Image (cartoon, grey):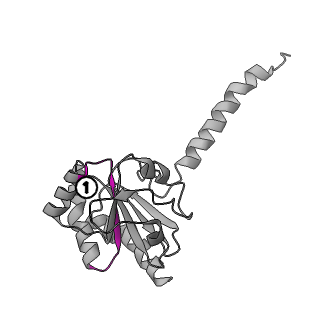
Amino acid sequence: MAKISPLMIAPPLVFAGLAVMFMVGMQRENPDELPTALAGKQAPAVQAIALSDLPEFTDAALRDGQVKLVNFWASWCAPCRVEHPNLEALADQGVPIYGVNYKDKPEAALKFLAELGNPYVAVSQDDTGRMGLNWGVYGVPETYVIDGEGRILMRHAGPITQRVIEGKLGETIKAATAAQ
């Protein structure tokens, strides 16, 4: 009878382990959605600078007792233009939205807001991308739902569309507001 060496057992065990990890990873509710490791945790500090003379988004605003959105955007971002009317509609419905202008030129950002409107309660500029990095931003636009205590409830990567508002984003905002 042939003796079984550990080297013969290792490849199938490694394959089985990888298969299990892959299957566990596919158990997300929506595999197309980018997850966030920060869900349920305190939002990282606001580390941004004023954007001209617009009201500045500060760290204190994260923990002001209100449910809010934090939207990372840029003037050079085509999907940011697409989502902008939906952000304005949410703002008109009373949802506070704080903007973080991401790696943009201040004059271009101001022109963008002058042209399309300003849905933000306050907006600051992340000119170096450091704040975005701390928040786990993959690219703009990205929007976070934050509870009144400053915890991240959800993250949406990509433009806010009507379908997103009617889906998980709207549900998360409603549930968080009801829980206040």
Q: Is residue 62 left or right of residue 105?
A: right
Q: Residue furthest front?
A: 53
Q: Which residue is mark 1?
A: 80
Q: Is residue 118 magenta?
A: no
Q: Is residue 113 left or right of residue 96?
A: left
Magenta residues, as a range?
93-106
Residue 38 in percent (x, y) is at 53, 58
Q: Residue furthest top?
A: 2
Identify the secondary structure beneath mark 1. Answer: helix
Q: Residue at x 49, y 51 (%)?
A: 134
The N terminus - image quarter: top right
Q: Is residue 95 magenta?
A: yes
Residue 164 in percent (x, y) is at 32, 65
Q: Residue at x 53, y 61 (%)?
A: 39
Q: Residue at x 49, y 67 (%)?
A: 153
Residue 54 in percent (x, y) is at 27, 66
Q: Residue furthest left?
A: 115
The image quadrant of residue 111 is bottom left
Residue 22 in percent (x, y) is at 56, 42
Q: Residue at x 79, y 23 (%)?
A: 6
Instruction: Compare residues 99 and 162 and report the one nearer the observer.
Output: 99
In the image, residue 35 sits, relative to residue 122, either above or below, namely above
The image quadrant of residue 161 is bottom left
Q: Callout 1: 10 Å neighbours few (<14), some, many (20+)?
A: many
> Amino acid type of disc 1?
Cys
Instruction: Compare residues 33 and 12 and report the one nearer the observer.
Output: 33
| Count of numbered marks | 1
